Image (spheres, rainbow, N blue to C red):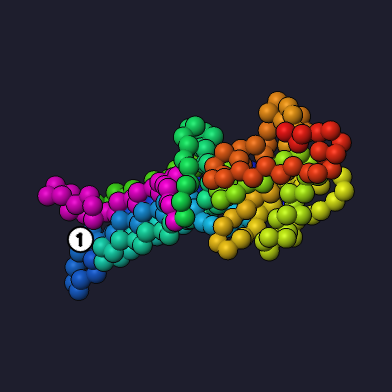
Amino acid sequence: MAFIDEIKIYGEAGTGGNGVVRWRQEKFIPKGGPAGGDGGRGGDFYAQAVRDVHILSKYKAKKSFYAEKGENGGNKSLHGKSGNDFILELPIGSIVTNLDTEESWQLLEEGQKVLLLKGGYGGFGNEHFKSSTNTTPKEWRPGEEGEHGNFYIELELFADIGLVGLPNAGKSSLLNVVTNADAKVGDYAFTTLDPNLGDFYGYTIADIPGLIEGANIGKGLGVKFLRHIKRTKMIAHLVSFDNLSNGSTGM
Protein backbone atom coordinates (compact mmCIF):
# COMPACT_ATOMS: atom_id res chain seq x y z
CA MET A 1 0.00 0.00 0.00
CA ALA A 2 1.45 3.34 -1.05
CA PHE A 3 1.93 5.79 1.78
CA ILE A 4 -0.09 8.96 1.21
CA ASP A 5 0.63 12.01 3.37
CA GLU A 6 -1.25 14.73 1.49
CA ILE A 7 -4.59 14.89 -0.32
CA LYS A 8 -7.19 17.35 -1.51
CA ILE A 9 -10.89 16.68 -0.96
CA TYR A 10 -14.25 18.38 -1.37
CA GLY A 11 -16.72 18.38 1.53
CA GLU A 12 -20.31 19.44 1.87
CA ALA A 13 -22.53 19.68 4.94
CA GLY A 14 -26.17 18.68 4.60
CA THR A 15 -28.89 20.98 3.28
CA GLY A 16 -31.79 21.55 5.65
CA GLY A 17 -35.12 19.90 4.89
CA ASN A 18 -37.97 21.94 3.44
CA GLY A 19 -40.96 23.14 5.41
CA VAL A 20 -44.32 21.96 4.03
CA VAL A 21 -47.90 23.14 3.65
CA ARG A 22 -50.32 20.79 5.41
CA TRP A 23 -53.75 21.14 7.03
CA ARG A 24 -55.39 19.58 10.04
CA GLN A 25 -57.91 16.97 8.98
CA GLU A 26 -60.96 17.47 11.19
CA LYS A 27 -64.39 16.10 10.48
CA PHE A 28 -66.72 18.64 8.84
CA ILE A 29 -63.95 21.29 8.93
CA PRO A 30 -62.07 21.55 5.64
CA LYS A 31 -58.66 23.10 6.04
CA GLY A 32 -58.96 23.01 9.80
CA GLY A 33 -55.83 25.06 10.32
CA PRO A 34 -52.15 24.87 9.33
CA ALA A 35 -50.30 21.70 10.30
CA GLY A 36 -47.17 21.75 8.14
CA GLY A 37 -44.00 20.92 10.06
CA ASP A 38 -40.53 22.41 9.74
CA GLY A 39 -37.70 20.67 7.91
CA GLY A 40 -34.87 18.98 9.79
CA ARG A 41 -31.40 20.45 10.00
CA GLY A 42 -28.70 19.23 7.62
CA GLY A 43 -25.86 17.15 9.02
CA ASP A 44 -22.56 18.78 10.00
CA PHE A 45 -19.19 17.83 8.49
CA TYR A 46 -16.41 16.88 10.93
CA ALA A 47 -12.82 15.66 10.88
CA GLN A 48 -11.71 13.24 13.60
CA ALA A 49 -8.23 11.96 14.48
CA VAL A 50 -7.55 8.21 14.44
CA ARG A 51 -4.38 6.17 14.92
CA ASP A 52 -4.34 4.66 11.41
CA VAL A 53 -1.57 6.54 9.56
CA HIS A 54 -2.49 4.81 6.28
CA ILE A 55 -6.12 5.91 6.24
CA LEU A 56 -5.51 8.68 3.69
CA SER A 57 -5.02 5.95 1.08
CA LYS A 58 -8.76 5.22 1.41
CA TYR A 59 -9.47 8.62 -0.08
CA LYS A 60 -7.24 8.23 -3.13
CA ALA A 61 -10.14 7.31 -5.42
CA LYS A 62 -13.09 8.99 -3.71
CA LYS A 63 -12.43 12.65 -2.94
CA SER A 64 -15.90 14.14 -2.44
CA PHE A 65 -17.83 13.61 0.80
CA TYR A 66 -21.29 14.69 1.91
CA ALA A 67 -23.20 14.91 5.16
CA GLU A 68 -26.85 13.86 5.05
CA LYS A 69 -29.67 16.23 4.14
CA GLY A 70 -32.39 17.02 6.65
CA GLU A 71 -35.82 15.48 6.10
CA ASN A 72 -38.73 17.60 4.95
CA GLY A 73 -41.41 18.52 7.45
CA GLY A 74 -44.50 16.35 7.75
CA ASN A 75 -48.21 16.40 8.48
CA LYS A 76 -49.63 16.99 11.95
CA SER A 77 -46.90 19.58 12.63
CA LEU A 78 -44.19 16.93 12.61
CA HIS A 79 -40.70 18.27 12.10
CA GLY A 80 -38.32 16.48 9.76
CA LYS A 81 -35.46 14.41 11.14
CA SER A 82 -32.03 16.04 11.18
CA GLY A 83 -29.50 14.63 8.72
CA ASN A 84 -26.66 12.46 9.99
CA ASP A 85 -23.29 14.14 10.43
CA PHE A 86 -20.37 13.05 8.28
CA ILE A 87 -17.09 12.28 10.04
CA LEU A 88 -13.91 12.28 7.96
CA GLU A 89 -11.35 10.10 9.74
CA LEU A 90 -7.79 11.42 9.46
CA PRO A 91 -4.47 10.32 10.99
CA ILE A 92 -3.19 11.94 14.16
CA GLY A 93 -0.87 14.74 13.05
CA SER A 94 -3.06 15.88 10.16
CA ILE A 95 -3.28 19.57 9.31
CA VAL A 96 -6.56 20.45 7.59
CA THR A 97 -6.78 23.68 5.59
CA ASN A 98 -9.93 25.08 4.00
CA LEU A 99 -8.63 26.32 0.66
CA ASP A 100 -11.61 28.66 0.24
CA THR A 101 -11.42 30.43 3.62
CA GLU A 102 -7.77 29.66 4.59
CA GLU A 103 -8.95 28.40 8.00
CA SER A 104 -6.72 25.68 9.42
CA TRP A 105 -7.06 22.96 12.08
CA GLN A 106 -4.55 20.53 13.61
CA LEU A 107 -5.49 17.06 14.84
CA LEU A 108 -3.03 16.33 17.63
CA GLU A 109 -4.56 13.50 19.67
CA GLU A 110 -6.67 10.43 19.09
CA GLY A 111 -10.41 11.12 19.12
CA GLN A 112 -10.03 14.88 18.62
CA LYS A 113 -12.96 16.11 16.55
CA VAL A 114 -13.25 19.45 14.75
CA LEU A 115 -16.21 21.00 12.96
CA LEU A 116 -15.28 21.88 9.38
CA LEU A 117 -18.68 22.71 7.87
CA LYS A 118 -22.10 23.48 9.38
CA GLY A 119 -25.29 21.95 8.10
CA GLY A 120 -28.12 24.19 6.92
CA TYR A 121 -31.16 25.01 9.07
CA GLY A 122 -34.46 23.41 8.19
CA GLY A 123 -37.13 25.49 6.46
CA PHE A 124 -40.43 26.56 8.05
CA GLY A 125 -43.76 24.82 7.48
CA ASN A 126 -46.99 26.78 7.10
CA GLU A 127 -47.87 26.34 10.78
CA HIS A 128 -44.96 28.66 11.51
CA PHE A 129 -46.73 31.53 9.75
CA LYS A 130 -50.08 31.28 11.54
CA SER A 131 -51.27 34.53 13.14
CA SER A 132 -54.46 36.23 14.28
CA THR A 133 -54.73 37.91 10.89
CA ASN A 134 -53.68 34.88 8.84
CA THR A 135 -55.30 31.69 10.09
CA THR A 136 -54.74 29.69 6.89
CA PRO A 137 -51.21 30.56 5.76
CA LYS A 138 -49.86 28.95 2.63
CA GLU A 139 -46.32 30.19 3.09
CA TRP A 140 -43.42 27.81 3.60
CA ARG A 141 -39.65 28.08 3.46
CA PRO A 142 -37.05 25.78 1.89
CA GLY A 143 -34.14 24.51 3.94
CA GLU A 144 -30.84 26.38 3.93
CA GLU A 145 -27.90 24.99 2.02
CA GLY A 146 -25.11 23.45 4.06
CA GLU A 147 -21.63 24.92 3.97
CA HIS A 148 -19.18 23.45 1.47
CA GLY A 149 -15.48 23.74 0.81
CA ASN A 150 -12.29 22.40 -0.70
CA PHE A 151 -9.70 21.10 1.74
CA TYR A 152 -5.99 20.33 1.67
CA ILE A 153 -4.91 17.71 4.20
CA GLU A 154 -1.25 17.28 5.10
CA LEU A 155 0.08 14.67 7.51
CA GLU A 156 2.96 15.25 9.91
CA LEU A 157 3.74 11.89 11.48
CA PHE A 158 3.53 11.45 15.25
CA ALA A 159 6.23 8.88 15.99
CA ASP A 160 8.08 8.05 19.19
CA ILE A 161 11.36 7.46 17.34
CA GLY A 162 12.39 8.72 13.92
CA LEU A 163 15.22 6.96 12.08
CA VAL A 164 17.25 9.39 9.96
CA GLY A 165 20.52 9.16 8.09
CA LEU A 166 22.12 9.15 4.68
CA PRO A 167 20.62 6.99 1.93
CA ASN A 168 21.50 3.29 2.32
CA ALA A 169 22.53 3.70 5.97
CA GLY A 170 20.44 0.69 7.04
CA LYS A 171 17.39 2.45 8.47
CA SER A 172 14.88 0.14 6.79
CA SER A 173 16.86 -2.96 7.74
CA LEU A 174 16.90 -1.91 11.39
CA LEU A 175 13.18 -1.14 11.31
CA ASN A 176 12.42 -4.60 9.90
CA VAL A 177 14.55 -6.32 12.56
CA VAL A 178 13.12 -4.59 15.64
CA THR A 179 9.48 -4.22 14.52
CA ASN A 180 6.86 -6.01 12.48
CA ALA A 181 7.45 -3.73 9.49
CA ASP A 182 8.13 -4.98 5.98
CA ALA A 183 10.06 -2.04 4.57
CA LYS A 184 11.72 -2.42 1.18
CA VAL A 185 15.49 -2.98 1.39
CA GLY A 186 17.93 -2.56 -1.49
CA ASP A 187 21.59 -1.93 -2.20
CA TYR A 188 21.03 1.47 -3.79
CA ALA A 189 20.33 5.01 -2.66
CA PHE A 190 16.77 6.13 -1.95
CA THR A 191 15.34 2.61 -1.70
CA THR A 192 12.86 4.14 0.73
CA LEU A 193 10.67 6.64 -1.09
CA ASP A 194 7.93 6.84 1.56
CA PRO A 195 8.07 6.81 5.37
CA ASN A 196 7.73 3.32 6.87
CA LEU A 197 6.29 2.66 10.31
CA GLY A 198 6.73 -0.17 12.77
CA ASP A 199 5.61 -0.97 16.30
CA PHE A 200 8.13 -1.83 19.02
CA TYR A 201 6.38 -2.76 22.29
CA GLY A 202 3.86 0.03 21.88
CA TYR A 203 6.35 2.59 20.58
CA THR A 204 6.02 3.79 16.99
CA ILE A 205 9.23 3.91 14.96
CA ALA A 206 9.34 5.80 11.67
CA ASP A 207 11.89 5.18 8.94
CA ILE A 208 12.30 8.53 7.19
CA PRO A 209 13.56 8.47 3.56
CA GLY A 210 17.27 9.18 3.21
CA LEU A 211 18.37 12.73 3.86
CA ILE A 212 21.29 14.39 2.13
CA GLU A 213 22.96 17.74 2.43
CA GLY A 214 20.72 20.34 0.82
CA ALA A 215 17.47 18.42 1.36
CA ASN A 216 16.02 21.61 2.87
CA ILE A 217 16.39 23.34 -0.50
CA GLY A 218 15.04 20.49 -2.59
CA LYS A 219 18.00 18.15 -3.16
CA GLY A 220 17.49 14.39 -3.05
CA LEU A 221 13.87 13.76 -2.14
CA GLY A 222 13.58 17.39 -1.09
CA VAL A 223 11.63 18.89 1.78
CA LYS A 224 8.54 16.72 1.37
CA PHE A 225 9.46 14.31 4.16
CA LEU A 226 11.32 16.68 6.46
CA ARG A 227 7.99 17.62 8.03
CA HIS A 228 7.69 14.08 9.44
CA ILE A 229 10.63 14.79 11.76
CA LYS A 230 8.99 17.86 13.34
CA ARG A 231 6.71 15.98 15.74
CA THR A 232 8.97 12.99 16.42
CA LYS A 233 9.74 12.63 20.12
CA MET A 234 13.22 11.19 19.58
CA ILE A 235 15.54 11.12 16.55
CA ALA A 236 17.95 8.22 16.04
CA HIS A 237 20.71 9.08 13.56
CA LEU A 238 22.05 5.96 11.87
CA VAL A 239 25.63 5.99 10.57
CA SER A 240 26.74 3.19 8.26
CA PHE A 241 30.20 1.66 8.86
CA ASP A 242 30.53 1.50 5.08
CA ASN A 243 30.25 5.27 4.97
CA LEU A 244 32.92 5.61 7.65
CA SER A 245 35.30 3.32 5.78
CA ASN A 246 34.84 5.50 2.70
CA GLY A 247 35.81 8.60 4.62
CA SER A 248 32.26 9.88 5.13
CA THR A 249 31.11 10.95 8.59
CA GLY A 250 27.47 10.21 7.80
CA MET A 251 26.58 13.69 8.93
Q: Is residue 102 magenta?
A: no
Residue 46 makes an appearance in the image = no
- Which residue is more in the foreground, 42 or 217? 217
Q: Is residue 180 left or right of residue 115?
A: right
Badge 1 local density, few (<14 within 10 Å), some, or many (20+)?
Answer: some
- Element at label 1: loop
Residue 79 makes an appearance in the image = yes
Q: Is residue 105 left or right of residue 59?
A: left
- Which residue is more in the foreground, 87 or 161? 161
In the rendered image, the quadrant that contains the N terminus is bottom right
**What residue appears at the point 85 percent right and 51 percent down from the top-left corner?**
186
Where does the image place residue 153, in percent across and percent down from the top left?
A: 57, 42
Q: Which residues are magenta?
A: 111-136
Q: Is residue 181 above or below residue 209?
A: below
| Quadrant of the rendered image containing residue 244 | top right
Q: Give the residue number, with chain letter if any, for mark 1.
A: 33
**What residue appears at the point 70 percent right and 25 percent down from the top-left corner?**
217
In the rendered image, the quadrant that contains the C terminus is top right
Q: Is residue 129 magenta?
A: yes
